[in-house]
Amino acid sequence: MADNSHCGCTPAGDSAGQVRDLYTRLALHPERDFGWGKGRQNARHLGYDPAWLERLPASIWESAAAVENPFSLGPLLTGETALDLGCGAGADMCIAALLVGATGRISGVDVTPAMVLKARHNAQLAGFGNVTVHEADMTALPLPDASVDVVISNWAVSLGAEPARGNRLP
């Protein structure tokens, strides 16, 4: 696993409120320097497919604070149902929507209301009708058990209530 200490992510012991405050600021003021890579250039650096970077509107990338490229772990297939935990402004969620196509479904979950609004707007802006975004904590998902084929997350799991559990989902 990569070292995410450079990303500005919440240090151990920080509260959920501080996480929401940080990502609210990122949603509302993406032009600010947060001390870590963000946006389209950061995604390019992380090895995101150039076609995705060009296909999605520039505004989708402005609040994208990717630490890794979750799509480097394996493909999403046409028709699959995927869940993006900690979807933020929705850049990875929108890529997933591209990959699963119109016959697939994507659900995004984020705990930050401003990011949820931005993710919904970004999915609509990109023209994805197969995306649903929920405001929820990842430990209390608003989805039925066994309702997704694939789960992606771009280090958001490390910001959860139990980061000591590593990358294992609850």
Image (cartoon, helix red, strand yellow):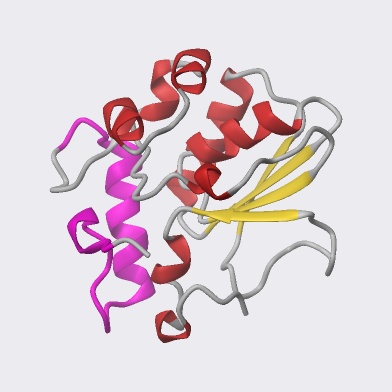
Q: Residue 146: x and y, percent?
A: 84, 66
Report the quarter where the C terminus lies.
bottom right
Q: Residue 118: x and y, percent?
A: 48, 36
Q: Is residue 144 above or below residue 126?
A: below
Q: Is residue 32 above or below residue 50?
A: below
Q: Residue 71: x and y, percent?
A: 54, 42
Please state if 130 lies on the left or on the right of 153 as rendered.
Answer: right
Magenta region, residue range:
3-32
Relative depth, front residue between 168 and 156 = 168
Relative depth, front residue between 112 and 141 = 141
Q: Residue 47: x and y, percent?
A: 38, 34
Q: Residue at x 76, y 37 (%)?
A: 77
The part of the image, by quadrant, that contains residue 42 is top left
The part of the image, by quadrant, that contains residue 38 is top left
Q: Is residue 101 above or below residue 12?
A: above
Q: Residue at x 74, y 33 (%)?
A: 100
Q: Is residue 39 magenta?
A: no
Q: Residue at x 29, y 67 (%)?
A: 18
Report the quarter where the N terminus lies.
bottom left
Please state if 17 lies on the left or on the right of 33 as rendered.
Answer: right
Please state if 47 lies on the left or on the right of 5 as rendered.
Answer: right
Q: Residue at x 60, y 28 (%)?
A: 123
Q: Is residue 20 magenta?
A: yes
